[in-house]
Image (spheres, rainbow, N blue to C red):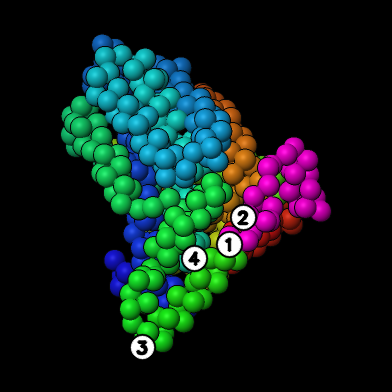
């Protein structure tokens, strides 16, 4: 794994960091097992909703557009509740315990899908999926940012979104290849693996320092740094190891001073959100605009309704057959983000991806609006090409880096609370988008849907281009 990842990343500095931080990378991989399963849940909804609207539904009767909108939007209710719950527990419980808790509602999601006898089971199941999502998007970025070195943090957190993308592709394919009740049996295994894998990794040094468990914090720091202090003490002849351990000890002492004496150890108060020479206010403004862009661009909602979008585009291609192709482009996009994010920075990937996203959505809307049925039949590959462009571009810039940028632009002292508030906004926006998107798509048409999303992208990007700072290389302990 390390050899493969070292060949991907550019430059000896990042390669050396990867080899040094092997345990942190393994912790990163274990933390994303649940993201993979969660991605299966995302992708599973798209073809399943389309199937449930046909006579092939496993229920007594096909579901309606109104029920489709509730299947989508109940996820956002759970997402909001998950943000609130995990926002309250993020600093009250250890990071690792919070990571454990995210697995249980996800298992309930798949169990309810298996035993579903009516659409109401899916409503409740999607609510539990939202709870997990809220936990993953609040806890996981913080957990990973606290165990990963600054040199590899952006790349590996972007790689984390590739786990989601791979899960999405599996979720796109499974419902079209196996019986409705088989997918839950397969997917429920992953959260169990996740719990077992996470058991072997300590809590983050930051979390342990906050709870004044200094000896354990130092052990965790050395564990994730890949430093065996006992071996170093026994082998004084190895000057390189001794120097490395000494440097790590100095770095840990600096961390300890920040948490015990600095702003991170102080109680967060309301006025802290307006301090830091107004940087907190600016960070909130940037985050909120970024949240609006993330949701209303369609970056998230496309995954849920991809099969329906392709079916409504006028293409004569089988939407069930071509949806996995679009899913593959999502994986490729997040993979490119992993390679490029530390080379070019967050801003470059974000804005270049939005340009491609806008072009693809305006292009698809114009194709559907200005061509007749004969042209659509002759050039039935064009909607697929535009959707591949839209999904790829959104994946490599906006989707892959949204949570990395959000975590990095928020001030250290209020990061946990501010991230939870930001994710609450994301969940509210997700409810709005998931609830109204079926009406836009099926009633107003794909042209209006694409034009609306593209226009919102343009407006929000103008603001972010003017005010969003580059966060590449930013310390997670300092503002």
Quick one: label 2, few (<14), some, or many (20+) residues within 10 Å? many
Q: Give the SS element for disc 1.
A: helix
Instruction: Tell us which disc is closer to us: 4 or 1.
Output: 1
Q: Are marks 2 and 4 in contact (CB under 8 Å)?
A: no
| Badge number at residue 142 | none
Label 4: which residue? Answer: 149
Distance between the alpha carbons at the discs numbered 3 and 2: 34 Å
Distance between the alpha carbons at the discs numbered 3 and 4: 27 Å
Pick the residue in front: 315 or 425. Answer: 425
Q: Give the SS element for disc 3.
A: loop
Tell me the magenta residue range.
255-282
Distance between the alpha carbons at the discs numbered 1 and 2: 6 Å
In the depicted structure, whether residue 477 falls above or below residue 364:
below
Earlier along the polypeptide chain: callout 1 or callout 3? 3
Label 2: which residue? Answer: 259
Earlier along the polypeptide chain: callout 3 or callout 4? 4
Earlier along the polypeptide chain: callout 2 or callout 4? 4
Residue 170 in the image: state x and y as whole percent: 28, 44
Residue 314 included in the magenta stretch of the image: no
Can residue 71 be seen in the rendering of this structure?
yes
Residue 259 in the image: state x and y as whole percent: 61, 55
Q: Are marks 4 and 1 in contact (CB under 8 Å)?
A: no
Quick one: label 1, few (<14), some, or many (20+) residues within 10 Å? some
Label 3: which residue? Answer: 237
Label 1: which residue? Answer: 255
């Amino acid at each position: 794994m390390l050899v493969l990842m070292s060949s991907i990343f550019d430059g000896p500095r990042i390669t050396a960091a990867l080899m040094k931080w092997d345990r942190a990378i393994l912790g990163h991989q274990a933390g994303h097992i649940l993201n993979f399963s969660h991605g299966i849940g995302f992708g599973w909804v798209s073809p399943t909703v389309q199937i449930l609207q046909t006579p092939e539904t496993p229920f007594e009767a096909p579901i309606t557009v109104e029920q489709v909108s509730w299947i989508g939007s109940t996820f956002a209710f759970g997402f909001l509740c998950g943000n609130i719950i995990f926002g309250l527990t993020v600093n009250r419980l250890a990071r690792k315990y919070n990571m454990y808790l995210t697995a249980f509602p996800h298992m309930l999601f798949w169990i309810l899908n298996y035993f579903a006898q009516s659409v109401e089971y899916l409503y409740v199941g999607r609510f539990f999926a939202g709870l997990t999502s809220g936990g993953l998007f609040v806890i996981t970025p913080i957990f990973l940012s606290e165990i990963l070195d600054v040199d590899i943090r952006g790349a590996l957190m972007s790689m984390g979104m590739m786990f989601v993308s791979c899960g999405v592709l599996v979720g796109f394919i499974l419902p079209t290849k196996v019986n409705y009740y088989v997918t839950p049996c397969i997917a429920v295994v992953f959260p169990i693996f996740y719990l077992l894998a996470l058991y072997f990794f300590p809590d983050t040094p930051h979390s342990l320092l906050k709870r004044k468990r200094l000896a354990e914090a130092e052990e965790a720091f050395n564990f994730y740094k890949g430093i065996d202090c006992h071996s170093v003490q026994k082998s004084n002849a190895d000057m390189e190891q001794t120097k490395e351990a000494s440097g790590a000890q100095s770095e840990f002492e600096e961390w300890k001073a920040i948490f015990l004496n600095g702003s991170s150890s102080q109680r967060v108060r309301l006025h802290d959100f307006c301090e830091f020479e107004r940087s907190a206010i600016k960070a909130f403004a940037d985050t909120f605009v970024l949240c609006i862009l993330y949701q209303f661009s369609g970056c998230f909602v496309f995954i849920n309704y991809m099969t329906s979008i392709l079916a409504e585009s006028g293409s004569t291609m089988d939407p069930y057959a071509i949806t996995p192709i679009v899913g593959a482009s999502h994986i490729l996009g997040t993979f490119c983000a992993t390679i490029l994010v530390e080379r070019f920075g967050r801003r470059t990937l974000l804005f270049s991806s939005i340009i491609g996203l806008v072009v693809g959505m305006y292009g698809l809307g114009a194709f559907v609006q200005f061509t007749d049925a004969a042209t659509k039949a002759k050039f039935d590959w064009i909607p697929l090409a535009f959707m591949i462009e839209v999904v790829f571009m959104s994946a490599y810039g906006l989707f892959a880096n949204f949570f990395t940028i959000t975590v990095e632009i928020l001030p250290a002292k209020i990061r946990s609370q501010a991230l939870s508030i930001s994710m609450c906004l994301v969940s509210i926006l997700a409810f709005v988008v998931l609830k109204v998107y079926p009406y836009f798509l099926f009633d107003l048409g794909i042209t209006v849907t694409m034009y609306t999303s593209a226009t919102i992208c343009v407006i929000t990007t103008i603001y972010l281009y003017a005010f969003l700072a580059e966060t590449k290389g930013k310390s997670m302990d300092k503002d």
